[in-house]
Image (cartoon, rainbow, N blue to C red):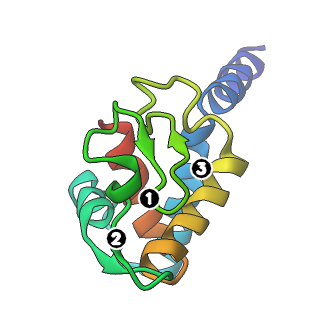
């Protein structure tokens, strides 16, 4: 019975915080790519998020170009002018709750800025940065 209660508690925790489960998945992928992986780092995530690169449309951009440097603020897509809700879950509690959307937007935004898909470590670093802001 005690085992069942622990299992139920763990299951509820995994469903209550889907981003945590995704970070565990990314950690496993990062370790598989690099046995020396030491964990995700919000400072690396900030560097990834704010550094500018010649993006897929030939313009020098960063993630912050659309999402701003203050993740509590609304952003705006620099190409379409579309408003973007705050990226920080502190300002937008629904942010980072749908893992399918998180994966989609990480893939799309890395391709827009870096012209490639992000590595598991890069994705984890960026997510940790977002979660901490």
98 horizontally vs 1: left or right: left
Residue 100 location (% of width, % of height) = 72, 50
Residue 90, percent from left and from top: 40, 24
- Residue at the farthest front position: 81
Residue of label 1 = 78
Q: Nearer the viewer, residue 73 or 114?
A: 73
Q: Nearer the viewer, residue 12 or 76?
A: 76
Q: CA distance from mark 3 to mark 2?
A: 27 Å
Q: At numbered mark 1, what does the secondary structure look like: helix, strand or loop?
A: loop
Residue 22 circle label: 3
Mark 2 residue crowding within 10 angstroms, few (<14) / some (14–19) / many (20+): many
Which is more N-terminal, label 1 or label 2? 2
Q: Secondary structure at mark 3?
A: helix
- Bin the neighbour count of mark 1 within 10 Å (Cα to Cα): few under 14, some 14-19, many 20 and up: few
Q: Quadrant of the C terminus?
A: top left
The reply to whether callout 2 and callout 1 are in contact (CB within 8 Å) is yes
Mark 1–mark 3 CB contact (< 8 Å):
no
Q: Nearer the viewer, mark 3 or mark 2?
A: 2
Residue 13 point in image, percent of width and height: 62, 26
| Residues tagged 3 and 2 counted as in contact (Cβ below 8 A) | no
For label 2, the residue is: 61
């Amino acid at each position: 019975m005690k085992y069942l209660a622990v299992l139920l508690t763990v299951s509820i925790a995994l469903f209550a915080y889907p981003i945590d489960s995704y970070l565990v998945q990314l950690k496993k992928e990062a370790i598989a790519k690099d046995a020396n992986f030491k964990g995700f780092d919000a400072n690396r995530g900030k560097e990834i998020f704010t550094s500018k690169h010649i993006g897929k449309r030939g313009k020098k951009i960063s993630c912050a170009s659309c999402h701003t440097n203050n993740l509590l603020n609304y952003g705006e897509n620099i190409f379409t002018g579309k408003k973007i809700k705050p990226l920080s879950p502190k300002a937008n509690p629904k942010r980072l709750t749908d893992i399918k959307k998180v994966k989609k937007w990480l893939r799309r935004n890395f391709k827009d800025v870096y012209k490639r898909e992000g590595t598991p470590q890069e994705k984890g670093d960026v997510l940790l940065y977002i979660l901490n802001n």
